[in-house]
Image (tube, rainbow, N blue to C red):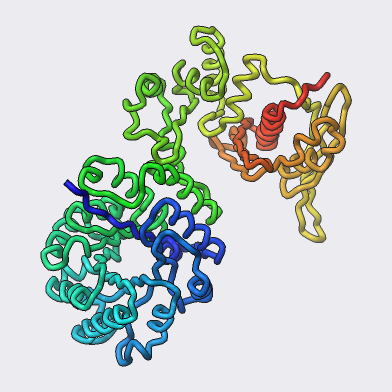
Amino acid sequence: MSKEKIYLFDTTLRDGAQTKGVDFGMDDKVKIANALSEIGIDYVEGGWPGANPTDTSFFNEPPKLKSNLVAFGMTKRSGRSCENDPGISSIVNANVNHVCIVGKSWDYHVDVALGISKEENLENIKDTTKYFIKNNKEFMFDAEHFFDGYKNNKDYALSCLKAAYDNGARWIVLCDTNGGTLPNEVAEIVSDVSKIIPNDHIGIHAHNDTGNAVANSLSAALAGARQIQGTLNGLGERCGNANLVSIIPTLILKNSFNKNFETNIDTKKLKKLTNCSRLLDEVLNKTSNKHAPYVGASAFAHKGGLHVSAVQKDPKTYEHIEPEQVGNERSIVISDQAGRSNILSRLEKLDIQINKDDPKIQTILDEVKDREFTGYSYDGADASFELLTRRLLGEVPNYIQIKNYEVKIVKDTDKKNINSIAKAYLIVDGKEILCEGEGNGPVNALDQAIRSNLDKIGKYSDYLKDLRLIDYKVRILNTGTNATTRVSIESSDDKGKSWFTIGVSPNIIEASFKALLDSIDYKLFKENAPSSSN
């Protein structure tokens, strides 16, 4: 039996751009569009030409994509023809062959938002559809608020769909614009629509206001829809859009779908999905969601010793797919819940060769649990865990010793500025080195004290010159002014590598310095730097 194709339509660059705090530049749009095209998305909606300078410029010089590039817009305004509507002109003159036009299908919106008659709204849909078809554009009609409209006035909502379909629309997209429809309702309504519109002309556009956008999209596909619209990582206003990053692997890897349907994305392209998801986060300068299905860093992370023991025997015991299928990887978390299985698995990943019966395994496990009792957490601090382990195994040389340090906070009463000044006395090859620095806060001052004096550190200066601190987080572990503080630092270098280290102390400056020194030691160890002859 031949499979039916489900077409994938991405609207990250248009609907996703309506998210609070998101403002894509031209380079951002091109980068994201190319990434979507490379994984095999059928339609990439680039924006709304004429609505803003960025989108207009994007369509004036569109990127060359394997995907179909789509221009978005709305039906013509009442009281004027398509030829005399500036919004319609901007879209029809865009350098694309595919357009997606939104129009009202909820009679309440026609009455209140547009303030026109229901018949006039139908005429606007008909005329707009005919105009784009006459201009040789593949026409898609986004039936805005369709599900609410169907519930309120079924006959009128369906007549809006027919107004577009009967005049040549390739796709009729049913939009749950308010995001309040539930999966069972979506299935029932799509099934009803399929009685008057063929399945291979029906699309779904779901919003996530009840947390059901992915479920609604999949329900619509099972009920007859053959185009699914959504965004990378569910980006979108309010609660977001349907998350294509969750939908795509479900369509390809789950038997309920892959036995009857196919997409333009094959298993090879699917392996690019995690990178594509994280590319968007990089463009938006935000931390990736660790708990995102399929692509999150924790999606295949195992913490409990019982779980890890089973995963080592067969990953299927606690994983619904192989992480490599979507470009992700398995992670064994080290914590106070860890058992020998966790430790052995992590050591194997670090390429540390050790016999499973070696008593040092228990030594490492006991040390991890003792440290976590005092506030350490190696869940996410891989570099500090590796250093701890290798130090216990005698594999980490002595590099830079800290004899002592001091930090002063000085307030300029005249200029009302607060400055942090740090001094650190280091010992390298038996020589004491004084490093001084100023910074925006005590941690930055200590960092600058070392960084600005690399020339004094001698043989380690070349190894550390590209070391950068890119993130710094503090967590107070208990209450009161004598609370224990946990500091996490993310560092990176010019090779594109990044790593996380941790420090714990009742003193926030000491906790920070511990994490900072672990970062330095990790960098030196990975660079195979020589030991100090202290």
Q: Position of residue 339 (x, y in %)?
A: 45, 18
Q: Residue at x 51, y 20 (%)?
A: 348
Vertical order, 160 against 502 (above or below)? below
Q: Is residue 88 visible?
A: yes
Say left or right for 180 vs 448: left
Say left or right for 167 vs 247: left
- The quadrant holding residue 160 is bottom left
Out of 486 and 109, give the one closest to the viewer: 109
Out of 392 and 121, give the one closest to the viewer: 121
Say left or right for 351 vs 67: right
Vertical order, 259 against 505 (above or below)? below
Q: Position of residue 39 (x, y in %)?
A: 42, 51
Q: Residue at x 26, y 67 (%)?
A: 171
- The quadrant holding residue 399 is top right
Quarter holding the C terminus is: top right
Q: Residue at x 59, y 32 (%)?
A: 484
